[in-house]
Image (cartoon, rainbow, N blue to C red):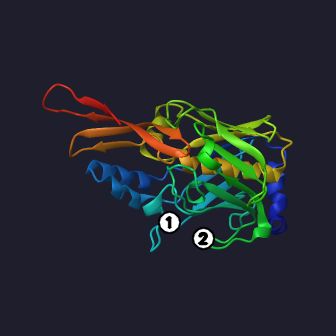
Amino acid sequence: MAEVAADYDSALEGVLEDTSRLIIKQEVEIMEAAVQAAANAINMSALGAFGETANKYDVFTNDGGKKFRVIETSEYCGCNCTNRVCCRPNHALKLHVYLPEIDTEHGVMHMDRPCKCGQCCACCRCCRQEMSVYEGEGSPELSEEDPSKLIGYIQQPVLGGIFSPKLDVMSREGEGSDPIASIQAEAFCCIAGICCDHTFTIRDPSGKKLGKIVKEKPDGLANLAKELATDADNFTMHVPPTMKPQEKGVMLAALHLIDYMFFENEGDFACDVINAKCKFKCCDLYCCGCVVPCSCNCDCCCSGGGGDDNYD
């Protein structure tokens, strides 16, 4: 096993070489859900940020076996303003990819996303989401990366696809680097929401469809309750089996970036016990990178005949 685990690049390629479908399931964080629910119940939803935990994902391939474990490392709360408590879901983070069947201590790939001014117009570098993808384990610290290990770079284009969210996938970072693929939502002005699937189409530079990333709607009442109470999501990624393993790895990284950009707060449900009010996030309105939540408010009048519904 030690000999196999030592060659991490070969192990990654061995898993992804003939894979045409990846299923990604985010782990449910009970403590995070409990803190958020308690904060909402006393009408102090901002306190829910203190329960924010680092995300964890399980990735399954065609045969249904768990092939990857993806674990976030990020600063919980510190002196800077890029930590989870202050900036979620736009905080600086790294995602480390492990092969649990081979080695649970040494990563085969990692992703680095800097903190951004999220949910605002994607007109300048500080507001355009990006993620760098590297081979190997990487450092758990949020520090400088080795550029020789870079295998892909993902960036939101200027104005973010206008009315349909878009990401450009490149082989390297920097001016003059042409996209090798683009990923764009099959949506117009509206994104997220738990009532339907959300599809992001992967295309090559000529516009030919290569595959798709699908954020799946909840299947059954149990999954609906899970998404209302937590930020755990399920995704499926379809790619051609002939795509290079490293490129598949970069597409997997793009999927995680999409999750942080649009689905961390999807279906937010808050029940304010003190004021007898409920609030449910229906979807996000999208334009040029700006993300504006659209919510439904319900005033529960216990003393007199019904309540009022308001929409934000």
- Where is residue 99? Give x, y as percent: 72, 58
Q: In this view, does 46 lie above or below 223?
A: below
Instruction: Sort mark 1 into few (<14), some (14-19) or many (20+) by Cα contacts within 10 Å.
Output: many
- Where is residue 213? Give x, y as percent: 67, 39
Instruction: Sort mark 2 into few (<14), some (14-19) or many (20+) by Cα contacts within 10 Å.
Output: some
Counting residues from the start of the chain, the first of labels 2 and 1 encountered is: 1
The CA distance from mark 2 to mark 1 is 11 Å
Task: Tell me where residue 210 sits by quadrant.
Answer: top right
Q: In this view, does 188 lie to the left or right of 21?
A: left
Q: Residue 203: which disc?
A: none
- Where is residue 139? Give x, y as percent: 66, 72
The kind of residue on which mark 2 rests is Leu
The kind of residue on which mark 1 rests is Thr
Question: Of tags 2 and 1, which is closer to the observer?
Answer: 1
Q: Quadrant of the N terminus?
A: bottom right
**Secondary structure beneath disc 1?**
loop
The residue under label 2 is: 142
Q: Could you tell me how many numbered marks the image carries?
A: 2
Q: Taking the image as drawn, is residue 15 in sight?
A: no
Task: Tell me where residue 239 sits by quadrant.
Answer: top right
The residue under label 1 is: 82
Residue at image x 70%, y 37%? Answer: 212
Residue at image x 86%, y 42%? Answer: 242
Q: In this view, does 53 lie to the left or right of 211?
A: left
**Secondary structure beneath disc 2?**
loop
